[in-house]
């Protein structure tokens, strides 16, 4: 995959849809001279290549010499972007605003100040409707420049209005900037480290969050609330406060539900919000709400808004695929989940240009867990080794639990000759990453002790291990072990002699029956 994606022009060409390719060829033939038609030949040659190979490319283009190639590639890249800009302007409000602002600047430089001001008034209306305050700041800045340098016969009232708008927007932009910075930094902390590991992490995150949070009484606009809810989401998720995580994920989506027009303006944020809401239901095992939210998301995925951009379409698909795996993981229907894997891997291959390494790692771990839960330990090992041998600078927690799952798979396969050295290696890695909780300590203690225990004596040892970790399930600093790998259900399956999938599925049925009983009781009380 890496070789395919090394050349930026090659990436751009292969990201184009049929309609975009057709539009580009019409655009270039209409706007370029004969000497520029060489870039059409270059475009066609790149489009037909399965992977970027410069020698093969030059062989297919005998009229182009190697010294010419870089200049032609640069020219083609610029022309492709110009063609896409022309094609996409009608469906992107940011591009529309930029275009109108450019027109106003051109008119101003021509000395047509009144015409420029009229366009700026229209741009302000569009920007306000779409809550694009950064554009408003640029528009007002140009308006003030024109009013300051020239006699426009504007009234005192107009001048006062400009001053007031300028102050209001600068305050709004400042709050949005601070909140979006906070959300971004919290998210990056999670990508680097995963969840908090101890009280030191907890104290550091709490202090950072409180010190960077603006006063709540100042937060009024859509974007301010959006980034506030995102900040709370990441703060809660990193701290494994899953109830708070759920509440603010729901507020995030409620914000869009209250103003559906903003789904078309900030589609990416809506898609990410749905993904977080599904994750929150998964973490809390809200089976019923998870299923309802997933259906709502799948219906949204069919709408024109969700398919208008490559990013929106691909990320909607990726998040739905992730939710489908989670749906099977939390119910213990591992074999059903594995039926989704071929299509998911096909989608990931198709969307390779748009999928980051972190997302690939998460999918790989989930698939490894499905294989482990279904009893195919060899396949589980194949998948976790992709993580172990991959980028170790990302998601320290997943790196650790991939190694732990790898160890447990070898234990299940009875590869005891590997267990002693492997146990030491995994223990050292997790200790180095400061990722050892009481659950993992007990796990390593049990594994080390179990090597010399006969099968008849193993069951009492498993029961002791289960008793030691069961009460930790509600401990916030210990929940990572249960979120990434259902250790309790694994031990219960060993004690009972039943498959792990059956243990988890029975828990799901029990929760569902309890939920139905609660609904029935509530119905009787209100009848």
Image (cartoon, rainbow, N blue to C red):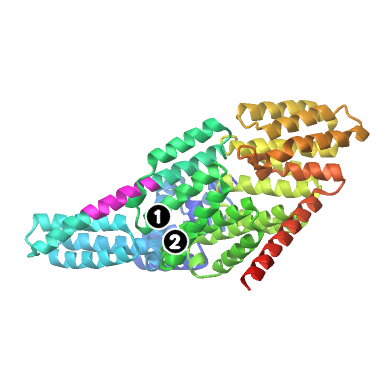
Q: Distance from label 1 to label 2 (Cα)? A: 8 Å
Where is mark 1, residue-wise?
Answer: 225
Classify mark 1: residues with Cα within 10 Å, few (<14), some (14-19) or many (20+).
some
Classify mark 2: residues with Cα within 10 Å, few (<14), some (14-19) or many (20+).
some
Indicate left or right for 522 with 464 as reference: left
Image quarter of residue 379: top right
Magenta stretch, main secondary structure class: helix
x and y, in percent, of residue 96 in the image: 33, 64
Work out whether residue 494 can be spotted. Answer: yes
Indicate left or right for 304 with 31 as reference: right
Q: Are marks 1 and 2 in contact (CB under 8 Å)?
A: yes
x and y, in percent, of residue 307 in the image: 51, 66
Secondary structure at badge 1 equals: helix
Image disc number at residue 356: none
Indicate left or right for 464 with 78 as reference: right
Secondary structure at badge 2 equals: helix
x and y, in percent, of residue 207 in the image: 44, 35
The answer to which of marks 1 and 2 sits earlier in the sequence is: 1
Q: Residue at x 69, y 67 (%)?
A: 520
Work out whether residue 50 can be spotted. Answer: no
Image quarter of residue 293: bottom right
Image disc number at residue 255: 2
């Amino acid at each position: 995959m890496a070789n395919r994606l090394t050349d930026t022009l090659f990436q751009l060409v292969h990201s184009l849809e049929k309609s975009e390719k057709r539009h580009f060829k019409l655009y270039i033939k209409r706007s370029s001279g004969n000497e520029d038609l060489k870039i059409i030949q270059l475009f066609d040659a790149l489009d037909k290549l399965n992977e970027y190979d410069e020698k093969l490319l030059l062989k297919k283009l005998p009229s182009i010499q190697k010294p010419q190639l870089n200049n032609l590639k640069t020219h083609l890249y610029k022309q492709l972007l110009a063609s896409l800009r022309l094609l996409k302007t009608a469906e992107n409000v940011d591009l529309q605003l930029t275009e109108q602002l450019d027109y106003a600047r051109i008119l101003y430089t021509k000395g047509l100040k009144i015409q420029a001001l009229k366009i700026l008034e229209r741009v302000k209306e569009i920007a306000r409707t779409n809550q694009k305050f950064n554009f408003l700041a640029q528009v007002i800045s140009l308006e003030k420049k024109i009013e300051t340098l020239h006699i426009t016969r504007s009234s005192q009232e107009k001048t006062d209005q400009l001053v007031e708008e300028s102050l209001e927007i600068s305050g709004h932009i400042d709050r949005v900037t601070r909140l979006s910075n906070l959300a971004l930094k919290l998210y990056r902390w999670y990508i680097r480290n995963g969840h908090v590991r101890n009280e030191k992490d907890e104290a550091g995150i709490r202090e950072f969050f409180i010190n960077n949070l603006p006063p709540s009484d100042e937060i009024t606009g859509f974007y301010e609330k959006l980034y506030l809810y995102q900040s709370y989401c990441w703060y809660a998720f990193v701290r494994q406060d899953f109830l708070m995580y759920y509440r603010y994920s729901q507020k995030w989506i409620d914000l869009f539900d209250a103003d559906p027009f903003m789904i078309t303006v900030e589609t990416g944020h809506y898609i990410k919000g749905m993904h977080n809401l599904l994750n929150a239901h998964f973490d809390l095992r809200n089976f019923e709400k998870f299923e309802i939210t997933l259906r709502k998301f799948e219906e949204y995925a069919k709408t024109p808004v969700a398919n208008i951009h490559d990013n929106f379409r691909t990320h909607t698909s990726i998040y739905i695929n992730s939710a489908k795996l989670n749906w099977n993981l939390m119910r213990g229907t591992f074999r059903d989940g594995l039926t989704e894997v071929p299509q998911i891997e096909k989608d990931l291959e198709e969307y390779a240009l748009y999928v980051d390494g972190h997302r690939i790692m998460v999918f790989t771990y989930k698939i490894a867990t499905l294989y482990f839960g279904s009893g195919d330990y060899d396949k589980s090992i194949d998948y976790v080794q992709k993580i172990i041998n991959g980028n170790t600078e990302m998601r320290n927690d997943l790196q650790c639990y991939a190694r732990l799952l790898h160890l447990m798979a070898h234990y299940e396969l009875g590869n005891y000759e590997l267990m002693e050295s492997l146990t030491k290696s995994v223990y050292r890695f997790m200790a180095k990453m400061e990722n050892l909780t009481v659950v993992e300590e007990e796990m390593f203690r049990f594994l080390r002790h179990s090597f010399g225990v006969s099968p008849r004596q193993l069951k009492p040892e498993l029961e002791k291990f289960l008793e030691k970790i069961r009460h930790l399930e509600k401990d916030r600093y210990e929940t990572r072990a249960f979120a990434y790998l259902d250790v309790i259900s694994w031990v219960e399956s060993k004690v009972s002699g039943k498959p792990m999938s059956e243990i988890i599925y029975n828990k799901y049925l029990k929760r569902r029956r309890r939920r139905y009983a609660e609904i029935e009781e509530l119905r009787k009380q209100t009848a």
